Image (tube, rainbow, N blue to C red):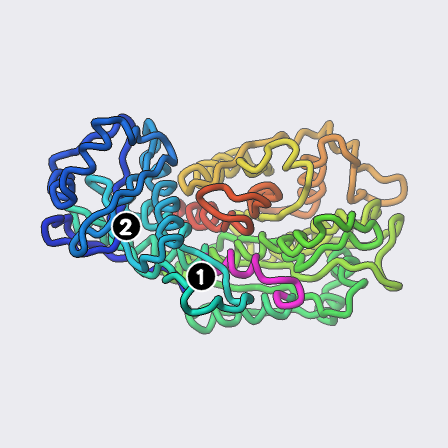
Amino acid sequence: MTLSLNTAAPNFGTLDTPLLVVALSSPPSVSDALAAADSAVGGAIARVIGRRDFRGSRDETLHLAGGDRGIQRVLLVGMGGVTDRAGALRRAGAIAARQANRLGVGTLAFFAGPLTAADAEAAGLGLAAGSWDFKELKTAPPADEQRAPLAEATLLAADGTAADRGVGVARAIAEGHALARRLGMLPGNVCTPDYLADTARDIAKRLGMVVTTLDRAAMTREKMGSFLSVAQGTSQDPRLIVLEYRGGTKGTPPVALVGKGLCFDSGGISIKPAQGMEWMKFDMCGAAGVLGAMEAIGRLELPINVVGLIGATTNMPSGEAVKPGDVVQASNGKYIEIINTDAEGRLVLADVLSFAKRFSPSAVVDAATLTGACVIALGHTATGVMGNDESLVQEVLDAGKKSGEPGWPLPLWDDYKELIKSDIADVKNSGGRPAGTITAALFLKEFAEGYPWVHLDIAGTAYTESDLGTVPRGPTGVPVGTFVEFVRGRVR
């Protein structure tokens, strides 16, 4: 269930809520607008600020009791010294919503002073992200142990028109985030290539898009030997999923969003270590990001043509699996020597990127949990960003920053191509450990021909193995925000 977001005027004298969230920067103060709320709780806000019990540091929280009616609880959330107000509001909203879920209040009111449309959008997205919880595969606890999940949040804003506009956008993007996170959380035996295809069909039916899927036989006719080499070790049919949103002028070249959809990655014959392999259900987060973005774009009704392309399969060891040393031919005619079967995502994307050319796209942005090397280089904070067009790279970096999904550029210098030269084929799929993120992107570049292209390596940002405060362990929703903000930027 996605959080219901609303707006209202900040009439604290008549406000009736189980939880009032107040987001404050550092050093905090009780503004004229907040004074009425402070009065309603007996001056408690001013007292804790005056005693410096609450200092407004980033992520700092303080819970105050209210009355039996009206404002029943107050949660102060610190935003620190704010330099990026939208980012601070997004983070404060997420922390507040997570606290509200723990309290079991069901609904809350959120106040952070005057809100522009962009502020309201950011706060709404934060609240929605923090309220998200995945419980559908868990048995419900006894009734007396259950707490009401946060179902509704009201942003208190004096400028109702601007707030309504921002919240409207937040609702659409939050639905995309929720879809991507749910798909990521589902285990590999549930979220199969067919499941992703069915999800695309559902989006198309609800939001007026066109969906096409290619199965193993169709991909064989298209001579997608690179993609099919990954799928040959599994009995599950692979799927190339194409989802078209036609919101722009007919015939206008679309933006293409491409996602890696490895519903489970064992590594194949180059099998991964057993410890932690269960996390490889998240190897389809690029595909989830495309579907989440298409959900949001359709709800926003943006006046632009967008095509989402997903390569979905599983990478399994079997008697039929591709072997290290095998050579396969991609649909663009290039021969690939497979050095490591665990470098499979790039083999799938090679044919998907080649397929994208038939749409004559104005730009192509792909996202993939592609390399562990990116996690070593950038940790879990920034997405690796590379491409064949510097202006497009900067456009994507700007979109990531604005959406709260920061990226960092890495070089695609020709010097690195020596690492993926093959003795017997046109290119090999792994250059070893040195510059692993860069050589993976250079491999993709061989197939991203004829259009401006950017690659997002989201291996460190699409999911987290630890609680980040704003989101729990599991999928983060990256790269939905980057995709949507990039497309929005193209129509502004």
Q: What residue lies at 55% left-to-right and 54% top-to-bottom?
A: 360
| Circle 2/circle 1 CB separation < 8 Å | no
Q: Residue 179 magenta-drawn? A: yes
Question: Which residue is at the front of the view, 388 or 301?
Answer: 301
**Residue 358 position within the rendered picture, expressed as x and y whole percent measured from the top left:** 60, 58
Classify 123 as above or below 435. below
Cα distance, mark 2 to mark 1? 18 Å
Classify 154 as above or below 123. below
Q: Residue 444 magenta-drawn? A: no
Q: Earlier in the sequence, mark 2 or mark 1?
A: 2
**Residue 181 position within the rendered picture, expressed as x and y whole percent measured from the top left:** 51, 56
| Residue stretch rendered in magenta on the structure | 178-191
Q: Look at label 1 and name its amino acid.
A: Glu
Q: Which residue is mark 2?
A: 166
Q: Which image quadrant for residue 145? A: bottom left
Q: Look at label 2 and name its amino acid.
A: Gly
